[in-house]
Image (cartoon, helix red, strand yellow):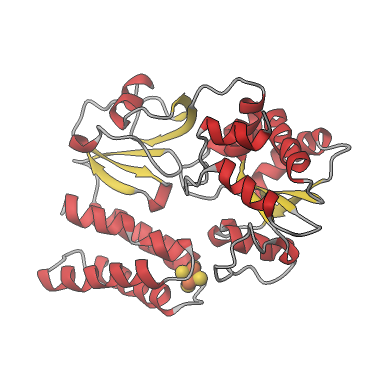
Amino acid sequence: MDIITKLKQSGLTGRSGSSFPVGLKWEMVKNAKAKEKYIVCNASEGEPYVNKDYYILKNYPEEVINGMKIAIETLKAKRAYIYINKDYYKEFGKTLKKLCIGLPIKLIEKQPGYLRGEETTILNVIEEKPPLPRIRPPFPTQEGLFKKPTLINNVETFYFVSKIVKKEYCKTKFYSIAGEVKNKGVFELPENLFINQILLQTNNKPEFDFFIQAGGGACGKILTSNELKQPLTGLGSIIVFNKKNTDVFKLMKKWAQFFNKENCDKCVPCREGLYRIEEIVNKKVITTEDKAILNELFTTIEQTSLCPLGKIASTPFKSAIEKLL
Ligand code: SF4
């Protein structure tokens, strides 16, 4: 059976948060008519409290490189890049370079900046252009690096590609658990577990009244302790907060400062919308009128922002206001 069919049959979906079917993405690049094709392994991991790619690079770097090697051969790619977080480069650069000897794989260090981890921004950085997102379509599978079809998968996805080809894939996923828990860290567990099962199995179920931020670090959605009978989507991150000790306005202020610092100011809804959100949460009181303004802002930002940062930035605010205030 060929590799793409194996990937399709495994049901593996991208582990960068998008959950796009991996086999289908590979097939799109394979079928694209072009002489040159490229591959990018996104190892930029910059989401606060998410460190699963760090864990995989530390413990299983050979699986990641093997997954990339399979991609290079299957898609007949001209070159592949590992676009890697600066700190990870310092720690794992030597090992990765050794594993890449004889392969057309180059390491590119990511400079600080959340947006530099966005996939079309990565393409611009590798091409030595300004680090800004591109308008989609065209998608990277059609027109990516140097205007050629490009496969972008992250570290965890390449790890599981290797496992699938070696017949060692057991439908697991990596979870980063942080916040007010006894046993912080990264855990590999079945991908269909409910959030409450993940907390129990990792010995992290709090005994106090709590809520969590689930899915994607700072972009994650707030869930109360009664909403945990559901699978964990996105980047597989859980941050636990003690309800009694957490100042929700302080928390929202932190998110607002983070998104305001990290957005690139390129489009109005994201730039102005995030500024207005920060202004409102700084007041420490949210009136009915504020709520109406915020709801309008959330919808506009979600629907009209150019890149994923803007599209998901309102998620934590929306859920926190709805469930915690
Ligand atoms: S959505 Fe925000 S971060 Fe993305 S391009 Fe627009 S201004 Fe920049």
Left or right: residue 284 compared with residue 240: left
Residue 276 drawn above or below residue 84: below
Q: Nearer the viewer, residue 1 or 88?
A: 1
Q: Position of residue 228 (x, y in %)?
A: 25, 34
- Residue 125 in the image: above or below residue 109: below
Residue found at the very far right of the displayed protein:
102
For residue 246, above or below residue 228? below
Residue furthest left in the image? 288
Q: Which picture quadrant has residue 9?
A: top right
**Residue placed most toward the observer, 153 or 204:** 153
Task: State which quadrant residue 59 falls in.
Answer: top right
- Compared to 274, does 22 lie above or below? above
Is 32 in front, or is 204?
32
Residue at horizontal 18%, vertical 35%? 226
**Residue 3 x/y as whole percent:** 67, 34
Residue 270: x %, y % from top left: 41, 72
Mark yes or no: residue 97 visible: yes
Which image quarter is the N terminus in?
top right
Left or right side of 222 for 68: right
**Is residue 43 shown to the viewer in this render?**
no
Quadrant assignment for the C terminus: bottom left
The picture places residue 71, in percent across and down from the top left corner, at 71, 41
